[in-house]
């Protein structure tokens, strides 16, 4: 006699040993119970664009919903960050073209826009951490992160200036220095300069794996360096074909004294983030760049994506890949959402 054919249920039970993966997904409570990665407000760093003068926020055309703020409005934004419990804001200046020169001299002015904004925020909202970029691109007439001789970006001469820029910012009250310039040896030199001046508690978050990327376009509009940039940044920012090099960059920054490392851009580089987080086990951050922000916003404005869902899913992906935190222009939106 032929055996009766097993039912589908019997065949599935035999194949799976009775393990039904969908059991854990059956309800909101069970999904929440077993979720491995949780996004929290404490994971967020909010980048803010500062502009000179008083007056209303200026829209950044290529970043819908993002504005350049007066110092007064930056203080208000910092209060909003405090109320939402966002731990850190990162300040980026829009520098008037008349203040730009080949050496980025305005970066060293203790009364430049970023320093004045830092002092004003520290005085009004001391409980929010302030991060400032170290790089010359907001200040140079050629839009590069360092100084040049002909077409060459000079490494060591740039590092000397970057150390002074870091000091000027630390003296204004900046808590976290973010070298984003990708010059060799800058973390060591900045650490030494800070320590020698008594700023032993000033943190360094190194842009360790910063790739030469098309995703920075809208940011360059926001800080006014888009039209200025001569050539590209491929002689100092990383080649997007490389992974092992990112590990070497991060290892070097950590050996030089970086407290935290960063991968930038974020979403197209989750593999890099994942490897760095697994390899070093140090606080590791991702920068959700302006290009990533604007792609989502463009789709939302066209009605092609559900914004809230896409934003939380994207930020959760950074966490899943191993990020301890994310710099995101969505930070206040997400913090408000997480609060419910
Ligand atoms: N150093 C900071 C950046 O270059 C930000 C780039 C972006 O948001 O596209
Ligand atoms: Mg490096």
Image (spheres, rainbow, N blue to C red):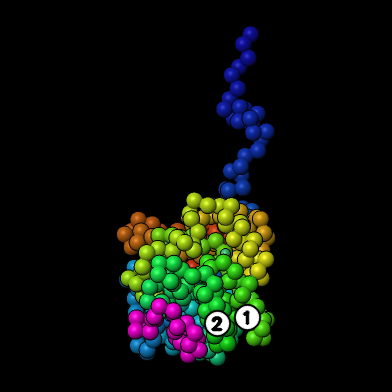
Q: Residue at x 61, y 27 (%)?
A: 11
Callout 1–callout 2 Cβ contact below 8 Å: yes
- Mark 1, residue position: 193
Distance Cα–Cα, label 1 vs label 2: 8 Å
Q: Which residues are magenta?
A: 94-117
Q: Residue at x 58, y 43 (%)?
A: 22
Considering the numbered disc 2 on the image, is that residue within a helix, a strand or a loop? helix
The residue nearer to you, when weighing 87 against 91, is 91
Query: Could you tell whether 254 is left or right of 311 in the image?
Result: right
Quarter of the image with the N terminus is: top right
Q: Look at the image and say whether residue 100 sits in the magenta stretch.
A: yes
Q: Position of residue 167 (x, y in %)?
A: 57, 83
Q: Residue at x 45, y 83 (%)?
A: 105
Query: Could you tell whether 292 is left or right of 84 in the image?
Result: left
Query: Could you tell whether 210 is left or right of 150 in the image?
Result: right
- Mark 2, residue position: 164
The residue nearer to you, when weighing 105 against 149, is 149
Reply above or below: 331 against 20. below
Residue 318, picture quadrant: bottom right
Q: Position of residue 252 (x, y in %)?
A: 63, 63
Q: Look at the image and say whether residue 295 sits in the magenta stretch.
A: no
């Amino acid at each position: 006699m032929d055996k009766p054919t097993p039912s589908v249920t019997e065949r599935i039970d035999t194949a799976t040993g009775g393990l039904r993966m969908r059991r854990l997904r059956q309800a909101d409570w069970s999904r929440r119970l077993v979720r491995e990665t949780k996004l929290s407000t404490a994971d967020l760093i909010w980048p803010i664009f500062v502009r000179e003068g008083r007056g209303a926020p200026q829209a950044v055309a290529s970043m819908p919903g993002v504005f350049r703020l007066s110092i007064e409005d930056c203080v208000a934004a910092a209060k909003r960050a405090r109320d939402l419990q966002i731990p850190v804001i990162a300040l980026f200046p829009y520098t008037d073209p008349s203040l730009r020169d080949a050496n980025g001299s305005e970066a060293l002015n203790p009364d430049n826009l970023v320093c004045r904004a830092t002092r004003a925020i520290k005085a009004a909202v001391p409980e929010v951490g302030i991060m400032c970029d170290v790089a010359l691109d907001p200040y140079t007439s050629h839009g590069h992160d360092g100084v040049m001789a002909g077409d060459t970006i000079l490494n060591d001469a740039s590092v000397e200036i970057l150390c002074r820029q870091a000091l000027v910012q630390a003296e204004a009250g900046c808590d976290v220095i973010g070298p984003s310039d990708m010059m060799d040896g800058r973390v060591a030199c900045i650490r030494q300069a800070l320590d020698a001046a008594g700023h032993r508690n000033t943190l360094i978050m190194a842009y360790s794996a910063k790739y030469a990327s098309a995703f920075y376009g809208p940011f360059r509009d926001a800080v006014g360096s888009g039209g200025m940039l001569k050539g590209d940044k491929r002689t100092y920012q990383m080649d997007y074909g490389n992974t092992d090099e990112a590990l070497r960059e991060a290892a070097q920054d950590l050996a030089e004294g970086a407290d935290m490392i960063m991968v930038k851009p974020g979403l197209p580089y989750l593999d890099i983030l994942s490897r760095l987080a697994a390899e070093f086990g140090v606080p590791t951050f991702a920068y959700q760049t302006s290009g990533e922000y604007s792609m989502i916003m463009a789709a939302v404005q066209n009605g092609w994506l559900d914004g809230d869902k896409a934003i939380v899913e994207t930020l959760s992906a950074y966490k899943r890949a191993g990020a301890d935190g994310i710099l995101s222009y969505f930070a206040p939106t997400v913090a408000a959402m997480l609060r419910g």
